[in-house]
Image (spheres, rainbow, N blue to C red):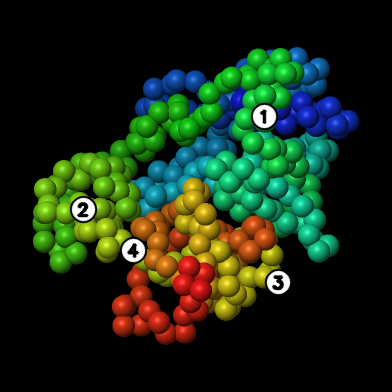
Amino acid sequence: MSGGVDSSVTAFVLKEAGWNITGITMRLPVVESCDFKRSCCGVQAAYVCRDLDIPHYFLDVREEFRAQVIEPFQTAYAAGWTPSPCVECNTVFKFGVVWDFIEREMCISKIATGHYAQVKEVDGRWSLLRGAQKSRDQSYFLYGIKAARLKNLVLPLGGWTKEDVRRRAADRGLRVAERQDSMELCFAGEGDYRNALGAAGREPGNIVNMQGAVIGRHTGIANFTHGQRRGLGVAATEPLYVLGIRPDCNEVVAGVRADAMMHIVEAGEVNVLDDATLREGARLLGKVRSGGDPMPCRVESLCEVGDERSISMTVRFDLPLFAPTPGQKLVLYDNNERLIAGGTIHRARCVPASRRGESEPRSEQGR
């Protein structure tokens, strides 16, 4: 429980339905260089639990969170990637280390959260599906949960809208009914994420075009991400976007929007929730950002990598996507909105115009 309206209403509706509820709040660190605004793990959750007459515990995970979420976040930016710390927090931490601890030390096997996604039993197996309110769907952030744990994941708000949640909180008289949603990184004090990067990627360098010619100067690669337009400070006849980041030579590559459009996305560290559906040649729907609708695509290849048999995948989209970004996530769904698999984007490329019709099914828009 973060102390926000979603987790608070989750606790309320589950208690109302007869569940035996315990509230648990992770006490997270805030990076020293950040201006503290308000904590996502404050006392509001404890007050809500008192009002609901349920026990509440703080779980101090500051040291582990720094090692498993914040430090990899900083390292990724220094390497020119754009990480998704909220996804990593869910994958590695909340539904990994923390759930293990709760299960082991408190003998609690089922975890409930206020995420806008759905868990259902479909054809005899548990599946993760998109939330009913598509503008609030958070399944993208949950793709990393292990398939075996889906049966013990409870998401009561998956079929609700945000308006439903706030109305229910107000009707119950919960003190958090009108609390503002958290929009920024909790460990950055809900301020600018760059404040959490420390000294990584701060050295000024050159902005170059696709031919390697210097066209400007940047203030540090940590200030840029693929597809970014604002902040380049380079005069040009048409708008320029970040096309690449080269940490080895401290360069930012810029070009026009058309050069940022990619058909093929490669992802590693893939977590599979439905191994029967994820196969080479499968026609699925994919997203490379949390917002927007999944787009038609085809799984080009799957392979195991390294001694740990980690899976990587290559996906070809029917229509090009704008700036798939290394470090962000590629998440795949089927036509019934079930989440099939997801992984970390390593690379993206375009298909030469002369080859775009080869072995490529026509898109839904063209049928």
Residue sitting farthest toward the bottom: 358
Instruction: Name the residue carrying label 1.
Output: 165
For residue 249, side relative to residue 315 (left or right): left
Q: Amino acid at mark 3?
A: Ala
CB under 8 Å between callouts 3 and 1?
A: no
The answer to which image quadrant residue 106 occupies is: top right
Q: Secondary structure at mark 3?
A: loop
Measure the C-alpha gap from mark 2 to mark 4: 13 Å
Mark toward the viewer: 3 or 2? 2
Q: Earlier in the sequence, mark 3 or mark 4?
A: 4
Describe the element under mark 4 as helix, strand or loop.
Answer: strand
Instruction: Answer with the quarter of the image where residue 55 lies.
Output: top right
Residue type at tag 4:
Met
Across and down, in percent, residue 323 comes to 36, 58
Residue tagged 3:
276
Residue at image location 39% in from the left, 50% down from the top: 82
Tell me if residue 94 comes above or below residue 1 in the rendering. below
Task: Report the Cα–Cα distance between label 3 and label 4.
Answer: 31 Å
> What's the mark number on residue 7?
none
- Callout 1: 10 Å neighbours few (<14), some, many (20+)? many
Labelled pair 4, 1 in contact (Cβ < 8 Å): no
Question: In the rendered image, which residue does mark 4 sit on?
Answer: 261
Above or below, 265 against 338 in this view is below
Left or right: 1 as drawn, with respect to 230: right
Task: Examine the rendering and report whether any part of residue 67 can be seen.
Answer: no
Look at the picture and state if 64 lies above or below 22: below
